[in-house]
Amino acid sequence: MAYLENNPTKEEKMGETAKIKIVRIAPFLGGVEVEYRKNDPKGVYVKLVIKELVTDETVFEEIGYCTPAALKADRLTVDVDYVAEVVLLDRDKEEIERSNARLFRCGFFPGKVIDYIHPDDQTFIRSGEFIGSPHIVRLDDGSYLAAHDVFSHDGVIGHEALCRIFASKDRGEHWKFASEIEHCTAGTLFTVKNCVYMLGNSGYVDGGGDIVLYCSKDGRTWSEPVVIAKRSKTACFRPCPMTYGVHEGRLWFYTGVYENNDNAVGVISADLNSDLTNPKSWVLSDWVHYEPEWCNGVEKWFPIMLEEGNVLVSPEGELKILIRCNSHRYDTPVVKPENIREIVFKIDAKNPKAAPVFEKSFCFNGGLHKAYMVHDEGAERYVGMVNRITADEIWQRNVLSLVSSKDLETWQIERDLLNLEDIGWGENSWQCAVQYPSFVIEGNDAMAVVRTAINGADNFHNANAMTFHCFKNINDKYRF
């Protein structure tokens, strides 16, 4: 993309301390919330300053005490690029230091913005410019952690891999910055025995790396990474934040494998009672490569034909992977419904080293993009959130739908949860998206995070926000 001349934002060195720093920015319709951290006991007051990017005119300025550590500005104009800074002041209201500058554009966002990165913001440029891989977990105390990585899509920016983590103690009503994990991307959050873990990719420039594990008690302080599967000269790993399985006393996670310019499917697992921070506790399976007959004879056209697999236990007690298939080329966007398919692999739970075995594929309007599926124990159903195609554009991700199934094969569309296609939204399907959902079920509600591109995002894929949504009463009236 074309970067701004005289860009006021600057690269932030990961781990570098400052006397005051903006750690989270969350625009909304007519305003913005700016969260900061101070590291100077002399700081008593803070001043939030908002300027228009183009004119450099100050449009908002307000002084407050250092607590709470988030300030809001309102009465701002939509579709205008702004610059936010926080100034740390002493007790005499003399300036100590100015924070890093952050860009934003306020406007309507579906749900609540947890975190936001303007497409021209250079703050996280070592890792990238866009928000990806959202994931959410509920901790034992009822609070939530939500994470996303920062990625680049043009091959120019260095992929140093940064994961940002946020916490909510009130069911997603308010969010605060919790921590950052360096050298981690596409991470899955999960809990075992009062600890929270992050399983991710160490993030090398070719799109894959080692599988790494981090451990924390609260999501704010994390251990050093443990490498549980190390890349080789011919193969690297691409795990991603998907549903993982608990079966036969083991944790089971899907992982992609990138081998000799080709993508493969595997799993990595560990005994629930083992020391998960010991690499010897983990078993990496053999892997299997894509075959055209799995998807109506669609030949491989892209190195990554299969990705983003959910690990689920079937009604028969078998361990399965339901995985996305990239069956359509982006340069020929007309969709063939018969080729929108979900691929099913069977995992040998008795032999963690065995490669997944292809079982079948089925038509599934949701299989062209990441689908997130869980088992709703209360309703005895499988529930998923998918981007179904309602137009001919293969890239369409601006409709997020709720689906359900009794058998992991026959899926019923229950309702649309978010729909930017049919409400007359001013940005088309190339410009906006609500995609890559992750959710947990709490009672009758689904608590979800979504990778959202809207209000001037780079494009539908290169999202500028992670948003939170409480979808009410999802399991009251399943059609099955």
Image (tube, helix red, strand yellow):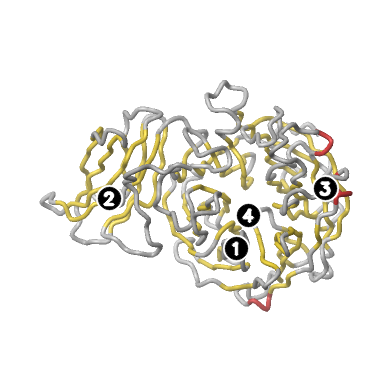
Task: Give me the C-alpha separation between circle 1 and circle 4.
Answer: 10 Å
What's under tag 2, amino acid-wise? Thr
Q: Nearer the viewer, mark 2 or mark 1?
A: 1
Is residue 147 visible in the rendered image? The answer is no
Compared to 112, does 15 lie above or below? below
The image's mark for residue 201 is 1
Tell me if mark 3 has few (under 14), some (14-19) or many (20+) residues whose alpha carbon lies within 10 angstroms of its own: some
Instruction: Looking at the picture, tell me which residue is in the foreground, 280 or 451.
Output: 451
Answer left or right for 283 relative to 160: right
Task: Give me the C-alpha separation between circle 4 and circle 3.
Answer: 27 Å
Task: Give me the C-alpha separation between circle 2 and circle 1.
Answer: 36 Å
Q: What secondary structure is found at the residue carrying circle 4?
A: loop
Answer left or right for 53 relative to 307: left
What's under tag 4, amino acid-wise? Pro
Q: Which of marks 1 and 4 is in front?
A: 1
Task: Give me the C-alpha separation between circle 3 and circle 2.
Answer: 58 Å
Tell me if mark 4 has few (under 14), some (14-19) or many (20+) residues whose alpha carbon lies within 10 angstroms of its own: many
First in sequence: mark 1 vs mark 4: 1
Task: Give me the C-alpha separation between circle 3 and circle 1.
Answer: 28 Å
Q: What secondary structure is found at the residue carrying circle 3?
A: loop
